[in-house]
Amino acid sequence: MNILPTLLAIVGSGCGDASIGTGPDPADAAVAVDAPMPCDGGDAQVVNAADGHCYMFFRTPATWAAADGTCKQIGAHLATSTTAAENDVILSLGDAALEDAWLGASDDQTEGTWLWTTGETVDYDNWRDMEPNDNGMLGEDCMVIEMDNSGTWDDRNCEARMFSYFCERP
Ligand SMILES: [Ca+2]
Ligand SMILES: [Ca+2]
Ligand SMILES: [Ca+2]
């Protein structure tokens, strides 16, 4: 169920859809040079109608650093959730059965100071009660969105467990 059905445009969950219209016609190719990159990475995708950002959901679990690297390889970054509306868009793309997924924020540099990897400030926040808590001997410096808990956030150890993740491309 989409939370914001009128704001979202699901653009498909597979690759190589011939209906997208990126055929080899030379005239089309000339027009496509300056066109934005198609929103077609990962296992599922959504375009935020509010700003055109493309979000891609990767189901295969990875460490936070590996997920960050995968996003960068495709010209994206781990998703940054800077408004409640954006958090809903990201949540709508996820899978509650997978529980948690990485977002692109960390307090690895300075404990307790959360930074988005893009340099955006963490003004809007959606931490669950009592989080972030830097739990455990090794601490917790990487952010997940709780897909099974209305999209609240928690800090998790960046390497002890692997999670699914969201990439975002402006
Ligand atoms: Ca964002
Ligand atoms: Ca921490
Ligand atoms: Ca925590």
Image (cartoon, rainbow, N blue to C red):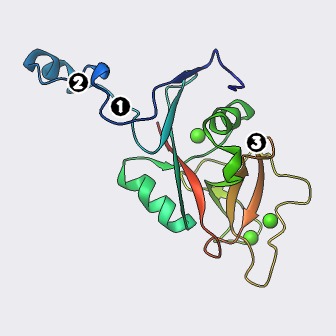
Q: Callout 1 environment at 10 Å: few (<14), some (14 to 19), or many (20+)?
A: few
Q: Residue at x 75, y 77 (%)?
A: 139
Q: Which callout, 1 or 2, points at the residue further toward the start of the chain? A: 2
Examine the rendered structure and indicate whether residue 135 appears above or below residue 25: below
Q: Callout 3 environment at 10 Å: few (<14), some (14 to 19), or many (20+)?
A: few
Instruction: Please state the horizontal and vertical placement of residue 167, each as a whole percent of the image.
Output: 51, 47
The answer to whether the residue labelled 1 contacts the one labelled 3, judged by CB atoms less than 8 Å apart, is no
For the residues labelled 1 and 3, the Cα–Cα distance comes to 28 Å
Examine the rendered structure and indicate whether residue 6 appears above or below residue 46: above
The type of residue carrying mark 1 is: Pro
Residue carrying label 3? 124
Q: Which callout, 1 or 3, points at the residue further toward the start of the chain? A: 1
| Circle 1 or circle 2, nearest the eye | 2
The numbered dot on residue 38 is: 1
Residue carrying label 2? 22
Quarter holding the N terminus?
top right
The numbered dot on residue 170 is: none
The type of residue carrying mark 3 is: Tyr
The answer to whether the residue labelled 1 contacts the one labelled 2, judged by CB atoms less than 8 Å apart, is yes
Q: Is residue 70 visible?
A: yes
Q: Callout 2 environment at 10 Å: few (<14), some (14 to 19), or many (20+)?
A: few
